[in-house]
Each structure stands twice: as structure tokens, then as C-alpha cells.
Amino acid sequence: MAKREEILTAALDVIARNGYRRTSVRELADAVGLSQAGLLHYFSSKEELFQEILRKRDEVDASAFESMHESPIEGFFAVIRHNSEVPGLVQLYAQVSTEAGDPDHPAREFFIERYKQFRAMFSQLIRDEQAAGRIDADLDADRIANLFLAAADGLQTQWMLDPSIDMADHVAYLWQLVTRA
């Protein structure tokens, strides 16, 4: 398990620095002193490796940003701002999440569960804000949560094509619109 974690941590750095398309399994293996076969010994396939890199990214982001901010929404904005600093990981996420649309893709269940967890977490945030009187209680918390995730993913795609787009600023503006009571 320790070597697997070392591989995932190194992969985050290599892909963030070089980009998803310019990172090979060989380069990831070299970063941790393994052969390609040795690296893939820890994962059932290249697809599982990339899925686990994304899972590790989520863990790192959650621990780094949620505890640093007064509110969960500020942590969410911070993660989005951080994404602009790691374009290779954004590319990896966009590529693998799109491929996971195929019912036979190995990462499909990972993304289904990830979206389910994020929707539930964000829906609860909306409900908490509604209970505090900061969001209209008549709004559907589950639909708003889904719209925020769609906006964040869509803005990432736009940002990859035009890096001048400030993803966090746009999502923060959407939050301002929703929190107008």
C-alpha cells in the first residue's frame, strides 16, 4: 500500500507539471524507480492507474482546502482556483470522465459514485444555507447542487480552451445569484 500511495503522489506531481497527454506510464514509473511492468503490478490496468490518480487528487484537495476555509463553499472555490494551477490534472479528469461515459469503461463506477457523493455533499450545503435563511427555501437543493457541478465541469472545459477564463470567479458569481434572498 505504501508503494501504491508513493506512485499516486508522484503521479499527481508529474501529470500536474507535464500534462496528461505528455505523461507516459514509463515516466510515472521512472519517477518512483520502477519499470513500467513494476508500476502496473500495483494496478490492474492503465485505466485503473489514472482512476486512482483522480481519486488521490480528490483526497489531497479535500484535506488541503476544506480545513483551510471558514465555509465549505469557500473550500469549493479554493479547489477550483487550485485547478488552474494543475492543468494536467484537469486534462486527465476531463479525458477520463468523458471516456467513463462508455458503459464498459473501468472508471465508470468511480465517476458515478463520485458525482453521487459530490451531489449529496453540495445538496446538504444548500439545505444548510436554506435553513440559515441565506438561500430561498423554495429552491430545489438537489437540482442546484447538480447545476453547480455541471457549471464547474463545463467551466473547466472552457478554461482548457481559453485559460483567461476565471473558473472560480464564475462559480462564485453563480453562488451569489443563488444566495440572493
Image: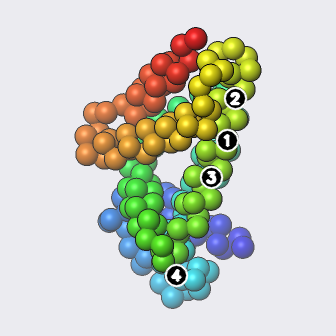
Q: Position of residue 96 (x, y in %)?
A: 43, 64
Q: Earlier in the sequence, mark 1 or mark 4?
A: 4
Mark closer to the observer (3, 4) = 3
Task: Kindly report the distance in space between the C-alpha atoms of the residues bearing marks 2 and 1.
Answer: 10 Å
Q: How many marks?
A: 4
User: What residue is disc 3 on?
Assistant: 116
Q: Earlier in the sequence, mark 2 or mark 1?
A: 1
User: What residue is disc 4 on?
Assistant: 45
- Graded by Cα atoms within 10 Å as few (under 14), some (14 to 19) or many (20 or more), the crowding at tag 4 reads few
User: What residue is disc 2 on?
Assistant: 127
Q: Residue furthest bottom?
A: 37
Quarter the C terminus occupies: top right
Question: Of residues 70 and 131, which is closer to you in this image?
Answer: 131
Which disc, if any, is residue 33?
none
Task: Kindly report the distance in space between the C-alpha atoms of the residues bearing marks 2 and 3.
Answer: 16 Å
User: What residue is disc 1 on?
Assistant: 121
- Graded by Cα atoms within 10 Å as few (under 14), some (14 to 19) or many (20 or more), the crowding at tag 3 reads few
Instruction: Give the SS element for disc 4.
Output: loop
Image marks 3 and 4: residues in contact by CB distance under 8 Å: no
Q: Hey, what amino acid is under mark 3?
A: Lys
Task: Kindly report the distance in space between the C-alpha atoms of the residues bearing marks 1 and 4.
Answer: 30 Å
Residue at horizontal 29%, vertical 39%? Answer: 163
Looking at the image, residue 148 lies above or below residue 137 = below
Q: Earlier in the sequence, mark 3 or mark 1?
A: 3
- Graded by Cα atoms within 10 Å as few (under 14), some (14 to 19) or many (20 or more), the crowding at tag 1 reads some
Q: Residue furthest top?
A: 181
- In-image side of 161 versus 151 (left or right): left
